[in-house]
Image (cartoon, grey):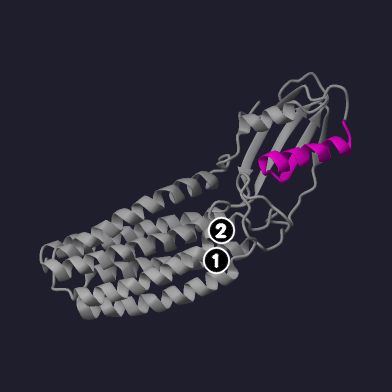
Amino acid sequence: MHGSHHHSGHSHGHAHGVGHAHAPADFGRAFAIGTVLNLAFVVGEGAAGVLTGSMALLADAGHNLSDVLGLLIAWGGASLAKRPASRRFTYGLSSSTILAALANAVLLLFAVGAIALEAVRRFNDPPPVEGGVVMIVAGIGIVINTATALMFARGRKGDINIRGAYLHMAADAAVSAGVVLGGALMLWSGARWIDPALSLGIVAVILWSTWGLLRDSVTMALHAVPPGIDPEAVEAALATLPGVARVHDLHIWPMSTTQVALTAHLLMPDGHPGDTFLQDAQQLLAHDHGIRHVTLQIEQGDGDPCRFDHGHGGIGG
């Protein structure tokens, strides 16, 4: 096999997200404001929960505390992703955003378990709860969580790390709305079981919002082709380039929650195509598929699979 290896130029200044979504490059201010607002609310809501004996408020405060930790994790991942590449970490630390999204999903599951256990325990002997105070505190939570979620709304489709932060806050706003409704029902009926039942409702909301984040972050951590990219379409696009007889050993994987990488072997029997061909190939992949980190190996041989392939040949391999 006569090979020629070319690493096409990277474009870091305007990287596409997964698929074709565009996300703002920096959410540092949103993370800072969201963390401060939610930490202050956790303290206030937790104190109100203790004073009123409301498990719903304590559950929501616990969930909000996990969200503060989630924001810090997502913020840390986004910050690490900006660090430059080194000799050891040749892609930099951009994959930190994937780990942060995965950690956020796991953290939410732990929060769910703690809330559910306490809610079930309280069903046996639910304490009296001041519904009016519950409604006021939860109403403040709706405002804070909605405002924080809106700060991340623009980036939720192009970056699952930002989506994790958004889901944390959006779920909290929905949970707080449920707590307000529960407080009203308690005032109207005086039924004590409503408070722990509401806590289990909170658990269901969190589980529903967490599943997609957990699934996507696990698949990205396992280097699956990111959602929104059709590997068969990418292979077909490369195969239609002038002079390409066959594409094999094609790999597409996420470098981070916003950057996608590709490597492929192109069989071109008529000779090395030159830099113009490689630049056109990179532009095609970036424009049509949102892939900006491209490595292409040109081969001029009989089309046999790469001799060094040991069962990991990728698409077309």
**Disc sitting over residue 75 in the figure:** 1
The residue labelled by disc 2 is: 154
Examine the rendered structure and indicate whether residue 32 appears above or below residue 282: below
- Magenta stretch: residue 293 in it? yes
Three-letter code for the amino acid on which mark 1 is drawn:
Trp
Where is residue 315? Give x, y as percent: 63, 29
Which is closer to the viewer, label 2 or label 1? 2
Q: Quarter-wise, where is residue 251 in the image?
A: top right
Total marks drawn?
A: 2
Q: Which residues are magenta?
A: 273-295
Q: Quarter-wise, where is residue 94 in the image?
A: bottom right
Question: In this orientation, does residue 314 appear?
Answer: no
Instruction: Give the secondary structure at mark 2.
Output: helix
Seen at 18% across and 59% down, the residue is 120
Where is residue 9? Give x, y as percent: 80, 47
| Left or right, residue 198 beside residue 283 | left
Q: Quarter-wise, where is residue 106 in the image?
A: bottom left
